[in-house]
Image: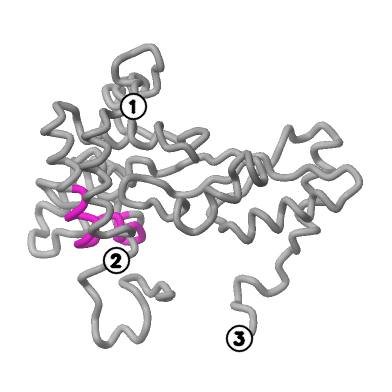
Amino acid sequence: HAPAAPWYRDHASFEEIAEAMSDLIDAGKLRGWGMCNDNAYGLTASCYAAYALENGHAPCVMQNDFSLINRRVEENGVTEASSPANENVGFMAYNVLAGGVLTGKYLDVAAAVDNPRDPELAERLLNDPRGRMDDYSWGKTLYRYRSGPAGDATRQYAAIADAAGVSLTELALRWCRARDGVTSSLIGHTSMAQLDETLACFDANGDKGKPLPADVAWEIDRVHMRNRLPIFASDRVGRDWDGAGEIGERVP
């Protein structure tokens, strides 16, 4: 194996983290602890580190990015590891609207950082942002949600939503809520109207709180099968980028 990457040097071990978290819980300072942006190995190792302690407390939740355009946890073992049949750790989905992309608001007018040929429009969007994607810092960092493949998938999902008579937001939220591996979803909004729409999708007693019809769910899966990880694909890759992505990230 190659030497540890800089961000792993001098890091705390699974055992040290489990012991520290367990001590805080025993002291009454925490009710539980969780993990974010980790994988099946990290989740399982953290659980077994806690099991090895005399009064250890395993993590109670894993939080990862999850949406119509990012089902990675269902394919990389996280969903299986966190299931009640294995470590029984809740899964909290974040970015279920893909940073606002799955509301459809960036389809007709691209994010500010994606308008280099129209500086006046870009400036207006930066001064009056519709969401994080119109922020220069966040917009550049989160470019993967607006990559060519992600945009293609989003437009296809928008067409499915239109044919089903629902908004793209509703389609994305109801799909996420119905996934077997999702315990809870983190939600974020730029308006009260969007919050009201989201809450309706999580109201089990309302029509919007019901699972999507089977034929709609199948149309979603058909789009997914054409590109299973669109936010990790890109049609903008320079020959001179030397093994890195658009913002310098390592290509696995």
Q: CA distance from mark 2 to mark 3?
A: 26 Å
Q: Is residue 113 left or right of residue 95?
A: left
Callout 3: helix, strand or loop? loop
Q: Of marks 1 and 3, which one's residue comes earlier in the chain?
A: 3
Residue closer to the observer: 210 or 236: 210
Give the foreground label among 1 and 3.
1
Image height check: is 251 above or below 88? below
Residue 99 spot, x, y in % from top left = 33, 45
Residue 18 spot, x, y in % from top left = 78, 51
Q: Which mark is residue 2?
A: 3
Within 10 angstroms of label 1, few (less than 14), some, or many (20 or more) residues? some
| Residue at numbered disc 1 | 211
Under mark 2, the amino acid is Ala
Q: CA distance from mark 2 to mark 1?
A: 29 Å
Give the foreground label among 2 and 1.
1
**Image mark count:** 3
Residue 70 spot, x, y in % from top left = 36, 52
Callout 1: helix, strand or loop? loop
Within 10 angstroms of label 2, few (less than 14), some, or many (20 or more) residues? some
Under mark 1, the amino acid is Pro
Q: Is residue 231 left or right of residue 60?
A: left
Under mark 3, the amino acid is Ala
Magenta run includes residue 148 = yes
Magenta stretch, main secondary structure, is: helix
| Residue at numbered disc 2 | 233
User: At x 65% / y 40%, what residue is drawn?
Assistant: 88
Q: Of marks 2 and 3, which one's residue comes earlier in the chain?
A: 3
The part of the chain drawn in magenta is 139-154
Q: Are marks 2 and 3 in contact (CB under 8 Å)?
A: no
Residue closer to the observer: 243 or 142: 243
Callout 2: helix, strand or loop? loop
